[in-house]
């Protein structure tokens, strides 16, 4: 009911803004649709004379395209990981918090409320993290997104190219999307480079067949050459972004944590606070089943609320945590029980 009321109350201005936010996504789909026409119709059907080569090119092109579109779709359409209701602070305590005249009182109220929650992250003054807009205790690694207007679990960044927050629920899809987009661009560039070289070598700018006859229409050649340039351009920008996110996966760090280290209740700020070793870090995002690693289905471990820290893993921490019901359990037992739970 609440959501329905909110939808009814949306002003024309906010509707325009939500349409505006889809422009980068529409642009990307437009480029993909044009590249499909240029590659399949102009290059494969109208220009490639060898039937076997054409079938081979089309099969690999469609495999790359399906994986690319599937992971892109999943990144766009997976709802952001939201904070469950038990993390919300009751109105009475929120009022106390806002009336508190000093930081120590606020800190005491927050720490008291969060004593039953599995939080290890703290603010710079040692208090449990609290979102004034959502009126919730922030789970570890979560942040408030001003575009989504809510706190988002394991927030990485808000990406306009997918019109969604990259976060716990779609991070695997996002990394796969970057990877498959790069594969798609490199494949298209690799299979059109021959035409590009022919074009450059030919004094008249005319592509010629093996018999020396000009092939393809003028517009057809334009589509194929433009396809080569666009795919190289996107590949160059994707390779650095994809490489950076592979690095972040392997050190178990979000983009936000790369800029500002999370602060722990024990040990203070630590950029490597969640680094469990490269293989364990990779499995935290991609799951334990290697058969599903490169398929855009959700296989990330955990519930987005609790994350094993390097001190849990390597034994320098206390090894004890509070579970969601306020009982003290070992870190390993808490981690396994939370993995079974679904938000
Ligand atoms: Zn918030
Ligand atoms: Zn967002």
Image (cartoon, rainbow, N blue to C red):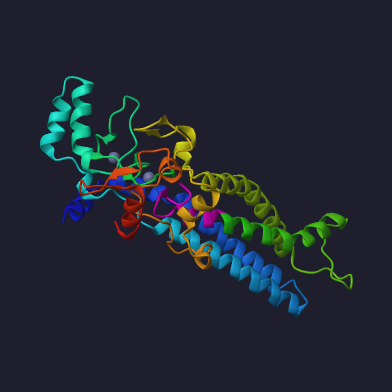
Tell how many labels: 0
Quadrant showing the N terminus: bottom left
Residue 13 in sight: no
Magenta stretch: residue 23 in it? no
Give residue 202's position: percent from left, percent from top. Answer: 87, 58
Residue that lies at the very extreme toward the bottom in this rendered image: 51
For the point 60% across and 49% down, the residue is 238
Residue located 30% across and 50% down the image: 82
Residue at 39% from the left image edge and 45% from the top image edge? 154
Residue 304 vertical position relative to residue 74 in the rendered view, above or below: above
Q: Residue at x 44, y 56 (%)?
A: 75
Quarter residue 203 falls in:
bottom right
Q: Which residues are magenta?
A: 159-178
Q: Along the line of sight, which residue is nearer the eye, 161 or 242?
A: 242
Nearest the viewer among 239 and 58 is 239
Image position of 127 (left or right of 65): left
Residue 175 position in % (x across, y down): 52, 53
């Amino acid at each position: 009911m609440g959501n329905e009321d909110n939808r009814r109350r949306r002003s024309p201005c906010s509707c325009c803004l939500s349409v505006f936010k889809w422009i980068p996504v529409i642009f990307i789909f437009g480029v993909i649709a044009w590249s499909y026409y240029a590659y399949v119709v102009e290059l494969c059907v109208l220009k490639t004379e060898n039937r076997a080569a054409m079938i081979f090119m089309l099969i690999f092109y469609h495999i790359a395209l399906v994986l690319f579109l599937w992971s892109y779709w999943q990144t766009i359409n997976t709802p952001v990981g939201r904070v469950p209701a038990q993390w919300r602070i009751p109105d009475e305590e929120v009022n106390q918090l806002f009336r508190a005249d000093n930081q120590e009182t606020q800190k005491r109220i927050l720490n008291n409320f969060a004593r039953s929650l599995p939080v290890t992250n703290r603010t710079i003054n040692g208090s449990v993290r609290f979102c004034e807009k959502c009126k919730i205790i922030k789970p570890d690694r979560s942040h408030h997104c001003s575009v989504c207007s809510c706190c988002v679990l394991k927030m990485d960044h808000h990406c306009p190219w997918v019109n969604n927050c990259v976060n716990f629920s779609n991070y695997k899809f996002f990394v796969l999307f970057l990877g498959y987009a790069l594969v798609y661009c490199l494949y298209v560039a690799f299979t059109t480079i021959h035409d590009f070289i022919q074009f450059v070598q030919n004094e008249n700018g005319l592509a010629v067949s093996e018999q020396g006859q000009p092939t393809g229409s003028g517009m057809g050649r334009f589509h194929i050459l433009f396809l080569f340039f666009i795919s190289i351009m996107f590949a160059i920008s994707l390779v650095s972004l994809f490489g950076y996110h592979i690095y972040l996966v392997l050190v178990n760090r979000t983009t936000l944590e790369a800029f500002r280290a999370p602060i722990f209740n024990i040990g203070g700020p630590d950029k490597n606070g969640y680094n469990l070793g490269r293989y364990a870090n990779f499995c935290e995002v991609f799951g334990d089943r290697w058969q599903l690693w490169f398929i855009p289905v959700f296989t990330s471990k955990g519930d987005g609320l609790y994350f094993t820290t390097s001190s849990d893993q390597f034994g320098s921490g206390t090894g004890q945590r509070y579970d969601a019901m306020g009982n003290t359990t070992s870190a390993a037992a808490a981690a396994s029980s939370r993995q079974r739970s679904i938000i």
